[in-house]
Amino acid sequence: MAIVLLAIFTASFAPLIAPYDPLKANLREMLQPPSLRHPLGTDELGRDILSRIIYGSRISLTLGVVSVGIGLMGGLPLGAVGAYYGGAADLIIMRFIDILLAFPAILLAIVVVSILGPGLYNAMIAVGVAQLPIYARLIRSVVLSIKEKDFVEAARALGAGDSWILFRHIVPNAMAPIIVQATLNIASAILSAAALGFLGLGAQPPTPEWGTMLSKGRVYLRVAPHVTTFPGLAILLTVLGFNLLGDGLRDALDPRMVRTRR
Amino acid sequence: MGRYILYRLFLTLFVLIGITVLVFSMIRLVPGDPAELLADQWATKEQIEFLRRTWGLDKPLLVQYIVFMKNLLQGNLGESIASNMPVAYEIRMRFPNTLKLAAAGMVIAVVIGGLAGIISATKPYSLFDNLAMVFALIGVSTPAFWLGLMLILLFSVKLNWLPCTGADTLRHLILPSLTLGLLAAGIIARQTRSSMLETLQQDYITTARAKGLREITVIYLHALRNALIPVVTIVGLQFGRLLGGTVLVETVFSWPGMGRLMVDSIFTRDYPVIQGAVLVFAAAFSLVNLGVDLLYGFIDPRIRYA
Amino acid sequence: MRKVFWLLIGTLALFSAALGAEPRSGGTLVVALGTDIPIFDCVYCHGIPNLGIIHLVTQGLTRINPTGGEPKVLPVLATSWEQSPDDPRVWIFHLRQGVKFHDGTPFNAEAVKFNIERMLDPETGALARGAFRMIEAVEVVDDYTVKIITKEPFAALPAQLAYSPMCINSPAQVRKLGNKEYHKAPVGTGPFKFVHHIRGQEVRLEANEEYWGGRPYLDAIVVKPIPEVASRLMALEAGEVHVAYHVPPRDAKRYMDNPGLGIDVLTPPQQRRMFIGLNVQWGPFRDPRVRQALNYAVDKEAIVESIFLGLTRPMDSPMPPTALCYTPAKYYEYNPDKARELLKEAGYPNGFEVTLHYGPGRYLMDTEVVEAVQFYLEQVGIKVKVVALEWAAYGAMMRKPLEENKLQMFFIGWGLPTLDPELGIGLFSKAAWSPGLNCMFYTNPEVEELIKAQRAATTLEERCAIVKRIQELIMEDAPFIALYYEPQIHAKRREVKDFVISVTERIDEVLIRDTWIEKGE
């Protein structure tokens, strides 16, 4: 929780915290190891890595949250509705999801980036759409098993409407795995951006996006390992934060969760 | 059951047709075509148009699609623009490599991740749990190419134990499958743990415990079975994805699998190969999914097939 | 005194033994390329390093001098050539005698005619057909003499025939397997014979015992595609491969600084010009003063020194230093004040906004260079928006004709595989406008005239005098920001001896015979 707050704080006040301009190149100070002047060293163009990571927190957090948001907004309703109603709706929705799933994510990313033009926002769309089926299928499988449960039968017996049952009773009960998945996927979205960067399709220079910094720095793995290590650590810590947050949220959201621990 | 499988296969056919339409139109919508790409510095407009004619790309889209479907019905996926070889041959050369890698990776992931998840869930907030979850987190937040490069650095360059390129022997399989497995293990461990934890809170577990059943029976016979559904979904999804090849791991280890074939073909706009590879991937993926759905019923008898 | 003498002799003897180790036969050379060889047939393959491997089996008529020096064109299967004194369109090539293809059929004038005609035949669908469109006819004079007639006088023909897609294949084998299938069992005259080609995995070649230049020392060559540069280098360091193509400058320096690693850095001369093309038909770039200002604004020396660690030099001509008739025409030194002044004169005291396109991953350190240029232009008030595109999509943008072309600035590298001005400056003419590669849409009437004139020149002096003028005019017009010549950096393990990568990025198809591997490591 504290880590997420720290990341959000860093992102909000980046200009105040960062010691240098994250875009300021200095070819005379390339790939310097960490020092007092540059606590995390400099990158391949002599830019201060600490400042780039601080500014990058804005970009990477946005990227993670927005693409997971896109995936959730698309995937949740599709999966839940399909599973609950079953029949033709389920059939059509799941075929659509199958097509999307069976379509290689990398091809999807290239298509999105080539048609819409490259850039951070389109990378978010590409990553988000690629994640959509994950949520749809996950929630479908959970709803399938929940909708047979007693409390759903009870609600139905009490005369509750379908949408009431679905969104009041079933979906909240299905949230736990979804939240776990979503928090993890914020991380994997950031990593997908790194993969796009690996293939040269990620954020545009000189944007200090963490994933792209990480993948670009691999070229210097042997001569200046700090160039990839620090963005990697930033991602790791943020991911850790989101996961702990996810766990906390799960406890708070799940009405049946008995708080016996600790 | 048999009827259900037939029915699902029938649906898969529709998905595959949908895929052909989608791939066919999408790759041609994307800017750049092989003629523009492969033409050299001397190329003129005439040469580029000449190459397009050579590959039949000058015809209207619909005509091209009909030709493609007609060939497909005769079991012919066309010929690669880059290699002149039948697309079916190109895929036959790559798919076994991908299958090998994906299977080995998944076995590692399920064994490590599954066990870690179960043990963590039974002893939540213990030292083991905390350690395992930290490793799981590192697993999910490490890019594949980074882990792969690190493993090469350690085992190939420093220790000189294992080869880092190629796919000739079993020894070549170790590093790439370990890379895949370790990363997927993180996801599986977390999912197993969280759904196990949830299952263990359920009433029937308490009942089972109250009945005086041994803890180990409770966990493995009652809880695990019910906790498996989301886990199987994740494993199935992961495995299905891996069948499409794992571009990053294949690139880092120069592994001649479907992922490289697909990416190389996308980058050179080798349309017939992209179409064929996506289609084969989609078919394999759909079959895995069918398997996963059948497993649901096996695990949780309350799910019925309509 | 005597003692000292003997000591001296002894030391000398040791020294010469160490230096002059005798070549030994045997061993398999493993080469790692960054690219995958798509198909083992010159007419369908693309990528110069890929074609270089194919040339070890199916050689060409001529080749470019691997050192980039004079003379530019050296013999392979043609031993000498001359332009007919009566008709400049007619060339006579004398062929190497007593050469046999790997299938035992003789190499002769008939084979040359067959292969050139195969290249030109539309039925073949050769990728580089356009590069040989100047050839009108090929005539067999006798077994070892062939006459090639061009449509117009074409001084660059011997260099053109050294262009990688031109290979001499066994006509018998091509006829036997057909055009499409020939790549499965190619047959040539080279020092190595084809064993197999598993796409994405490896190419295997074995020594040709009956090679016309004598059996090579190596028993076999294996070529592996290792696209990821970090993996390629680690495979080299682990000893899995002997040669790695395309090494980043920082790692080259690491090898040079640590001789204990046992890795030698190869730096063949450069032939690729790296620059930022400026669309001279777009907005501010219509004014040559703006284009010159941009050239003054970028610190090329800093880029060369810090990004390329001094392994190359800034660009001072539209042609590379290894090209025939190259002249250091004009160098734009780093002078941001002069740049601002020129911008002010041209009516842009506050600069302007512009978009720069490029396709990352194609050239050595490309993103670093683009970001550096972006930074330098920012310093003189020009806001550059960088757009990275996947290579094929970028290529499609370049191929668009003027009316539809949306490029303003673009980062590109032009190779000069023939080292000849024909292509070296030919791309700066209207004839090469998109869909050709001139998407700067540059043209200058004087340059156009001179390009025609050099083609018809009959002596080298005459030709070079004209070409010198062209280089000066183009540098003055500055349709680009002249950056640097792309350094070629490769690496090999030290036990590999006498191994040469040519100026054209190919393993030299003749010198490979002398390559050998020192055993006992």
Image (spheres, rainbow, N blue to C red):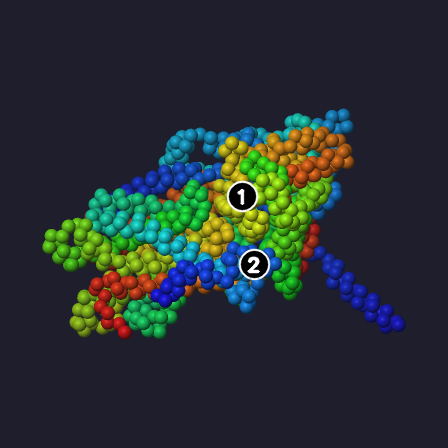
Residue C388 located left or right of residue B69: right
Which image quadrant: the C terminus of chain A? bottom left
Residue furthest top in the image: C86
Which residue is found at the position 53% from the left and 49% from the top? C361
- Quadrant of residue C455 within the rendered picture: top right
Q: Is residue C226 left or right of residue B59?
A: right
Q: Is residue C238 left or right of residue A198?
A: right
Tag 2: amino acid: Gly
Quarter that holds the N terminus of chain A = bottom left
Answer whether residue B32 is visible to the viewer in this image: yes
- Residue A118: x, y in percent? 45, 46
Q: Pointer 1: what residue?
A: C352
In depth, the one of B132 and B305 nearer the eye is B132
The residue shown at (19%, 55%) is A168
Number of marks drawn: 2
Specify few, some or many for label 1: CA neighbours under 10 Å numbering under 14, 14-19, or 20 or more. Answer: some
Asked if the residue under mark 1 is in contact with the one under mark 2, i.e. CB atoms within 8 Å, the reply is no
Q: Going 73% across and 45% down the picture, which residue do you hit?
A: C69
Q: Nearer the viewer, residue C8 or C282?
A: C282
The subunit letter for the residue under badge 2 reads: A
Q: Chain of mark 1?
A: C
Residue at label 2? A46
